[in-house]
Image (spheres, grey):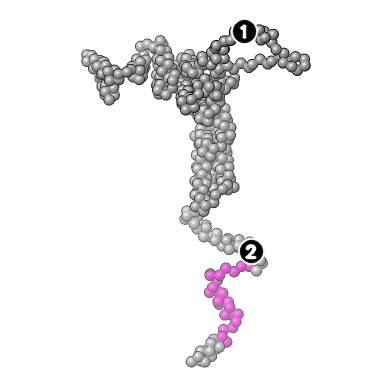
């Protein structure tokens, strides 16, 4: 049987020529083979050949939206005519999501240290925002998003540069001046913060928000000074001196005059003042000591000055004065000069608008509870006063409702 099988195999071989058999096998195995052309002897060329054979599959995945060429689509979109600021915003957000994915994979693969790709991705995102604000110079949301991203990646120098450009384009935008000044104050640069607030007050002369935020920033600075004094045990004068800055566009605290140069004779030796040789009585309090003790910053002179100057502006009204009062009242217990500043505000309101509802309301709300030694007795007196007002005939329902609520708050 084996012999017969071999005989049959020989007969089949003779019946099919060699060339015909090879062609038949190649036609059957063609879909499953990848024949490399003979001229491709380089390894790189062979690898590229096999990779290019997967292009149809990638095209199919793109048609089915399994994968997409988003970066190319975004580039074509922002370069086309009629592009909107939202196109740049979406492009930058997509790049940020891609960078977040890259970071997660690096963490998973335990790739620590600096990678060039991290800098490249941040640079690409910043470039997208830069192109966007150059194309749409007055697109405020895009500028704000640009600033937020720079703050996120801690690009401080670029943040200041972009903020300067934005303030030049939109000098009447109140929120921008407040944002720039508050960032400087948050970094401990009160000199720059004061300069920005003052310039904002000049450009936004019809808006009270800059003035109120300026006063709030100064109150926060006083609060920090008081906390620093308590922690370090230094005197208030020393704490103030450490943070003094003497510049042209800023409030000057303490002694800012330059000292006179000492006289030098022809030989280069210091020539003594003849009057200095005469013995003078020793002073207990020198001029410098008196000036330090009378430092206006210790008494809250800067917030008071801001409020007093704002009273001369066109926007000042009882509502604006009430806003100042509300802001100052939050620092009464945390700032040493808080009660004095609040009392100055209330006195100004009573002088300018004695019959205004805002003045009466602030007068009632004046936080004098902490000054009493018997809070329960004061609480009882306030409740009795509210009850007496509620008994008035023909009292408006709205006022009665407010007094009832006030009575509940005081009773707690």
Q: Which one is in front, 223 or 39?
A: 223
Q: Which one is in front, 212 or 94?
A: 212
Total labels: the figure holds 2
Segment colored magenta: 13-37
Of the two numbered discs 1 and 2 in the rendering, the one whose residue sits closer to the viewer: 1
- Judged from the image, the secondary structure of the residue bearing numbered disc 1 is loop
Instruction: Classify 279 as above or below 374.
Output: above
**Image point (55%, 77%), residue name:** 24
**Image point (50%, 24%), residue name:** 234
Q: Quadrant of residue 324?
A: top left
In x, y percent, where is residue 124?
A: 57, 43
Instruction: Classify 348 as above or below 133.
Output: above
The span from disc 1 to disc 2 (Cα, nearest Å) is 98 Å
Residue 251 appears anywhere in the view: yes
Q: For the residue carrying disc 1, how many other residues have a C-alpha within 10 Å: few (<14), some (14-19), or many (20+)?
A: few
Q: For the residue carrying disc 2, how many other residues have a C-alpha within 10 Å: few (<14), some (14-19), or many (20+)?
A: few
Mark 1 / mark 2, whichever is N-terminal: 2
Q: Quadrant of the C terminus?
A: top left
Looking at the image, residue 284 sits to the left or right of residue 266; the answer is: left
**Image point (53%, 30%), residue name:** 187
The residue labelled by disc 1 is 280
User: Magenta stretch mostly in which secondary structure?
Assistant: helix
The residue labelled by disc 2 is 43
């Amino acid at each position: 049987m084996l012999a017969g099988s071999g005989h049959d195999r020989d007969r089949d071989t003779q019946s099919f020529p060699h060339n015909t058999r090879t062609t038949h096998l190649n036609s059957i195995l063609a879909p499953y083979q990848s024949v490399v052309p003979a001229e491709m002897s380089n390894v790189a060329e062979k690898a590229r050949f096999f990779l290019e054979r997967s292009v149809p599959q990638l095209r199919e995945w793109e048609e089915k939206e399994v994968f997409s060429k988003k970066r190319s689509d975004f580039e074509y979109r922002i370069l086309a005519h009629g592009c909107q600021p939202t196109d740049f915003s979406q492009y930058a957000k997509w790049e940020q999501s891609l960078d977040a994915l890259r970071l997660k994979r690096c963490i998973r693969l335990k790739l620590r240290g600096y990678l060039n790709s991290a800098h490249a991705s941040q640079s690409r995102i910043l470039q997208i925002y830069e192109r966007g604000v150059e194309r749409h110079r007055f697109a405020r949301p895009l500028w704000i998003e640009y600033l937020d991203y720079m703050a996120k990646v801690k690009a401080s120098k670029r943040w200041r540069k972009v903020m300067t450009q934005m303030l030049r384009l939109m000098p009447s935008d109140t929120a921008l001046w407040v944002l720039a000044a508050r960032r400087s104050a948050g970094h401990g640069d009160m000199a720059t913060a004061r300069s920005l607030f003052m310039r904002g007050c000049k450009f936004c002369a019809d808006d009270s928000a800059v003035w109120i935020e300026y006063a709030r920033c100064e109150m926060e600075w006083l609060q920090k000074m008081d906390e620093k004094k308590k922690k370090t045990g230094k005197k208030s004068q020393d704490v103030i001196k450490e943070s003094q800055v003497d510049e042209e566009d800023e409030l000057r605290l303490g002694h800012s005059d330059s000292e006179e140069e000492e006289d030098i004779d022809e030989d280069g030796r210091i020539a003594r003042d003849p009057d200095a040789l005469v013995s003078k009585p020793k002073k207990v309090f020198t001029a410098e000591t008196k000036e330090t003790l009378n430092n206006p910053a210790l008494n809250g002179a800067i917030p008071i000055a801001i409020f007093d100057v704002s009273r001369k502006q066109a926007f000042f009204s009882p509502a604006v004065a009430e806003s100042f009062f509300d802001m100052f009242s939050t620092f009464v217990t945390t700032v040493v000069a808080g009660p004095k500043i609040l009392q100055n505000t209330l006195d100004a309101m009573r002088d300018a608008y004695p019959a205004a509802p805002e003045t009466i309301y602030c007068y009632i709300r004046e936080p004098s509870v902490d000054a009493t030694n018997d809070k329960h007795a004061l609480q009882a007196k306030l409740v009795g006063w509210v009850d007496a007002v509620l008994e008035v005939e023909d009292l408006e329902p709205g006022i009665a409702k407010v007094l009832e609520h006030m009575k509940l708050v005081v009773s707690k």
